[in-house]
Amino acid sequence: MESRGSGATAVEQHLLQSETPGKSGLQATSSDQVGRTLRWFTTVVLNAAFLGMGVSAAVLGPTFPDLARNVNRNISSLSEIFVGRALGYLGGSVVGGVLFDCMNHFLLLGLSHLLTAAGLYLTPFCKTAALLTAMMSITGVSFGVLDTAEVSKQLS
């Protein structure tokens, strides 16, 4: 085991310097303010994005009768769209785990949200059950990537 002397490492020195107040005691530098503002902005945007994702995941239930009417199918015979979305989610989780290791995290989240928005926008225009199932699979892929990215971000 390594014994610690009185000398601090570079990281510890940096942490100690950031904890000590400035010359006036309360005044923060402009880079500190920019950093705080950027962190708040990032937090607000990410929370809004995941709120939107929750709403978009829940919108399938209330719109299910209208989607069945669009594809001229009975509600009881259109359950394959749930299977399609679940399989897309499974695939998206696998792909998201791989992409999260080799891509910018925020870029991956942004692209996944754009894919979700495109899928939800195009869903009402699907006139066949196969096309609707494919669109739900695409939306499921983006949900899987988003959830994997969220969990990976929390673990890191």
Image: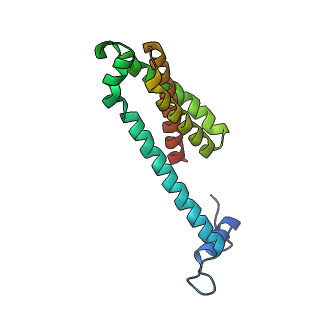
Residue 22 point in image, percent of width and height: 62, 82
Tell me if residue 5 can be seen: no
Q: Is residue 26 above or below residue 111?
A: below
Q: Quadrant of residue 19?
A: bottom right
Q: Residue at x 50, y 43 (%)?
A: 150
Res 39 visible: yes
Looking at the figure, which quarter contains the N terminus?
Answer: bottom right
Residue drawn at 53 percent across, 28 percent down: 92
Query: Percent x, y for residue 35?
Result: 61, 65
The tally of labels here is 0
Residue 41 locus on image (x, y percent): 54, 58
- Taking the spot 39% from the left edge, 40% from the top edge, the residue there is 55
Q: Seen in the image, is 44 located left or right of residue 28?
A: left
On the picture, is 56 further left or further right than 103?
left
Identity of the residue drawn at 52% across and 61% down = 40
Quadrant position of residue 38 = bottom right
